[in-house]
Amino acid sequence: MITFAGENWDAVLFETVSLLGRAFVFGGRPFARLGLVASSTTSENGKHQTLNNSHINNLWMPYTQMKTASAPLHVTSTDGVRMTLLDQRVLIDGIASWWTACHGYNHPHIVEAIVQQARQMPHVMLGGIVHDPALSLSERLAGMTLGPQSKVFLSESGSVAVEVALKIAVQYWMNRGDGERKKFICFAGAYHGDTTGAMAVCDAQDSMHAHFKGYLIQQYPHAIPHTDQQRSAFADFVRQRADSIAGVIIEPLIQMAAGMHMHAAEDLNFIYEICQQQNLLLIADEVATGFGRTGSMFAYEQTDFKPDLLCLGKALTGGTVPLAATVANENVYSAFHTDEAMHALMHGPTFTGHAIGCAAAHASLDLFETEPRLDQIASINQTLRDCLQPLSQYNSVKEVRVKGAVAAIEVQQAIDVGQAIHEFAEMGVFIRPIGSVVYLAPSFTISSDETKLLCGAATRFCESLS
């Protein structure tokens, strides 16, 4: 049983799931039917079985070759930085559910906000209707990012936040009478999501979406300019195509899904300078890097500029419910704020401005203000550096990278991800490598000892490769 201030939070969590199950219906199917309510798999004698692919039934898992994949771990509950499995093992989560659970799991402040909002008003559409959670969250996000005159478009996933940003950038030029600017500069190693427009601005050659090349709109990929030669080539590349370019999109400081590729703030400042020279919009995709992950609240804060468009998601709600945001500065929005009906942004996800999501986001932002998150991130960063930098001397290790609350150990060989997950589970941790990279991106509430346990597991794994 989990208790906080005399409350039985097991009961509260159960009530939350029940409320959500009654409140949300997707195509007539409540949450329980979508597998969002934990279920048990038991044998005839009542003992728990280990889940394997033959027992998954109708669930089609993401990024998984279902025929050959290793059996997934079956999680039944979470608490803080820990996950409990069906077989009763308890694992320290090293990647915070794809970097979303920044405050750890089941934080009572966020849970309470979700429960209260679910009781009052789970959701209403934002077509001809507004509500306080969406109004106040938009004002709060604008004030802490691109300024009080900026506008915030709320959606349900980071990929959609990127789609909205791309759409805004293209229509910005259309509304200004320049319909030829429809292309985007994107970068090697980029990942911006799995929807069609976002896929088109991912790495065109070496990404999970590369085999859709003939289907996707061709954009202008380029290497992130770091050296003088690369910067000169980038400036020439942009100048020759400027009349057809709507904007530049980049994940600032860390390309998370590419295996935690990291670049310098000076590289971003140079890209911004070129955008200014050629009158291009700059889109910062901070779906993964936003809300403290790189060491500052937003990665762009470590540069000399603010982007024209900012994409947020993942940790926005503390990893509890889906919500994302696209923030446009005053200049960008001004192209839409006219007397022309066709100048309006014609985009509207069904669950845009989702009230429960907005309440969760408010609660998550409260915690950044009332608990020492950035100090905790600095402490995590130091522990990661101290524990993992020695691995750079291993023959099996190509490079060790650390930034904010992210560490990447790139090894010399491809990793069997499914097998690695189970090896890490045997060490008492959940770590899911990407390609040839073992990475850590834990919740910011993790203790120093817990961080060291993660680092120890990563070290033992690399030793096994040697």
Image (tube, rainbow, N blue to C red):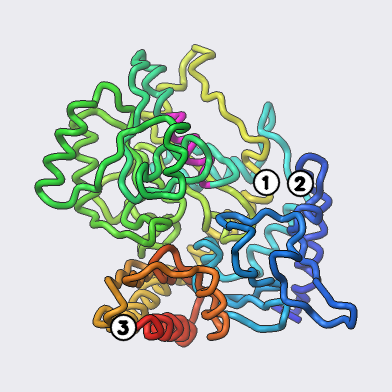
Q: Amino acid at mark 2?
A: Met
How many neighbours does mark 2 have within 10 angstroms: few (below 14), some (14-19), or many (20 or more)?
Answer: few
Which quarter shows the N terminus?
Answer: bottom right
* Lower position in the chain sequence, tag 3 or tag 2: 2
Q: Amino acid at mark 1?
A: Ala
Which quarter shows the C terminus?
Answer: bottom left
Q: Which residue is mark 2?
A: 121
Residue 313 is situated, as x and y percent measured from the top left of the image, at 51, 50
The part of the image, by quadrant, that contains residue 364 is: bottom right
Q: Are marks 3 and 2 in contact (CB under 8 Å)?
A: no
How many neighbours does mark 3 have within 10 angstroms: few (below 14), some (14-19), or many (20 or more)?
Answer: few
Local secondary structure at mark 1? helix
Foreground residue among 202 and 309: 202
**CA gap, disc 3 and disc 2:** 47 Å
Which residue is painted at 18% across and 52% down in the image?
A: 226
The numbered dot on residue 355 is 1
Query: What segment carries the magenta color?
Result: 158-168
Using residue 151 as the reference point, say whether residue 177 is left or right of it. left
**CA gap, disc 1 and disc 2:** 7 Å
Q: Nearer the viewer, mark 1 or mark 3?
A: 3
**CA gap, disc 1 and disc 3:** 42 Å
Q: Magenta span has 162?
A: yes
Using residue 442 as the reference point, say whether residue 413 is left or right of it. left
Local secondary structure at mark 3? helix
Which residue is painted at 39% across and 32% down in the image?
A: 330
**Residue 93 in view (yes/no):** no
The numbered dot on residue 386 is 3
